[in-house]
């Protein structure tokens, strides 16, 4: 038995040491955002996030005007109307499918004044895998190639007939007929790329007091708050019994009926949770640690990862900030107590209503019985 206790204590100590070692670390995150403009119109956006030089996530958006691919034109004596599509193609490294949002546009040109008005008639979302449209299944078991707004019957048919061509245009690389071909028109446009980079260094150190509270203290806080709420429910039942008795006996001018306030408990829990939240860069926070965070921001296309190289260009950040995230036992205990009280308040209210109703009626019955004597 003694050997078993020693082994348990050893493994517990080993686990705590492993937890402390795993929480003590320095991590470097770099976020890079780029926007490409052609003739002052954004045509592409990209985003990358790396941790310790390893890519965690990449996302991109491309914007398309598809009037040259397909359009529907109508004309009368006064107005020229064209319906076509614009699209946003979104790619995410965490998803195997690309997402394309097609917007149905209507352009109306006044022939007399040459004024043009544009309207968005609706939008549909399409999932694409390996350059091909994939179907989605709705809750009723139906399959759809696109989800979103419903167009007019004519434009629904127009969209269905042209969808594959639109997708092929967006996902096919531009082709040149031969080596002497003229460059695509987009390369003759004014182009500008705006880049911003942010380097975040997070130094994490285990908070021993918070770890001890989480393992040892937190269960007692929850147990204590739960017990106190049960006692309060019993108190409400007793008060309502007395209220029923006094109402019948005529010993009080008003009817006494008391219930716990879940609304107040919920508001208190929300306030405590807000006070206990990780204030700076919570997405990089390691559990059970205090963090010192250094943030450097850059405003041009640079390789922040190579700044330590001997021959690398030294680039000065345009902004630099430092933050500290400290885990507080007091704030955490307050948040745990308030959250437990709110949950217990819901349960307590559900239980207290019928119990209090019974005790109030019982008190009234007692008042009738004893006042007859």
Image (cartoon, grey):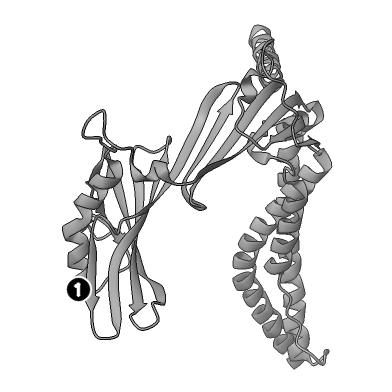
Q: Secondary structure at mark 1?
A: helix
Q: Is residue 280 above or below residue 27?
A: below
Which of the 4 image quarters holds residue 158?
bottom left
Q: Is residue 279 above or below residue 294?
A: below
Look at 49% across and 46% down and name the residue there. Answer: 190
Look at 66% across and 73% down and name the residue there. Answer: 356
Q: Nearer the viewer, residue 108 or 102?
A: 108
**Image coords of residue 131 (percent x, y):** 26, 40
Q: Is residue 363 above or below residue 202?
A: below
Q: Nearer the viewer, residue 95 or 131?
A: 131
Residue 339 appears left or right of 153: right
Q: How many marks?
A: 1
Which of the 4 image quarters holds residue 243?
bottom right
**Image coords of residue 65 (percent x, y):** 35, 56
Look at 34% across and 51% down and name the residue there. Answer: 100
**Image coords of residue 348 (percent x, y):** 65, 62
Q: Nearer the viewer, residue 175 or 99?
A: 175
Q: Write down the residue under mark 1.
A: 153
Instruction: Locate the C terminus and report the quarter of the image it occupies.
Output: bottom right
Which of the 4 image quarters holds residue 229?
bottom right
Q: Is residue 246 above or below residue 8?
A: below
Residue 76 appears left or right of 286: left
**Image coords of residue 98 (percent x, y):** 35, 43
Residue 165 appears left or right of 90: left
């Amino acid at each position: 038995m003694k050997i078993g206790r020693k082994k348990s204590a050893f493994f517990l100590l080993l686990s705590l040491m492993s937890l402390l070692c795993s929480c003590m670390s320095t991590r470097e995150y770099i976020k890079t955002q780029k926007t490409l403009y052609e003739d002052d119109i954004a045509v592409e956006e990209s985003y990358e996030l790396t941790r310790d030089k390893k890519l965690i996530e990449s996302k991109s958006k491309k914007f398309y005007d598809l009037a040259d691919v397909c359009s529907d034109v109508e004309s009368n004596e006064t107005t020229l109307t064209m319906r076509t599509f614009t699209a946003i193609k979104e790619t995410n490294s965490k998803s195997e499918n690309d997402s394309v949002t097609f917007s149905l546009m209507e352009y109306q040109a006044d022939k007399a004044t040459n004024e043009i008005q544009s309207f968005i008639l609706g939008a549909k979302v399409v999932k694409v895998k390996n350059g091909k449209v994939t179907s989605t299944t709705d809750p009723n078991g139906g399959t759809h190639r696109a989800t979103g707004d419903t167009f007019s019957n004519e434009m629904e048919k127009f969209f269905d007939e042209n969808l594959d061509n639109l997708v092929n245009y967006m996902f096919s690389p531009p082709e040149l007929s031969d080596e002497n071909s003229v460059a695509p028109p987009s390369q003759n446009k004014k182009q500008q790329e705006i880049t911003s980079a942010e380097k975040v260094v997070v130094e994490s150190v285990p908070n021993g007091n918070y770890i001890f509270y989480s393992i040892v203290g937190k269960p007692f806080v929850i147990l204590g708050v739960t017990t106190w709420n049960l006692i309060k429910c019993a108190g409400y039942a007793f008060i309502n019994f007395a209220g029923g008795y006094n109402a019948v006996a005529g010993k009080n001018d008003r009817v006494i009926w008391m219930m716990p306030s879940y609304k107040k408990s919920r508001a208190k829990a929300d306030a405590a949770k807000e006070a206990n939240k990780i204030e700076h860069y919570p997405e990089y926070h390691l559990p059970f640690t205090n963090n010192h965070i250094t943030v450097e921001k850059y405003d041009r296309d640079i390789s922040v990862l190579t700044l330590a190289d001997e021959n690398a260009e030294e680039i000065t950040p345009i902004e630099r900030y430092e933050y500290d995230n400290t885990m507080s036992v007091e704030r955490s205990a307050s948040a745990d107590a308030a959250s437990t009280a709110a949950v217990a308040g819901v349960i307590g209210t559900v239980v207290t209503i019928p119990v209090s109703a019974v005790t109030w009626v019982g008190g009234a019955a007692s008042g009738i019985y004893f006042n007859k004597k």
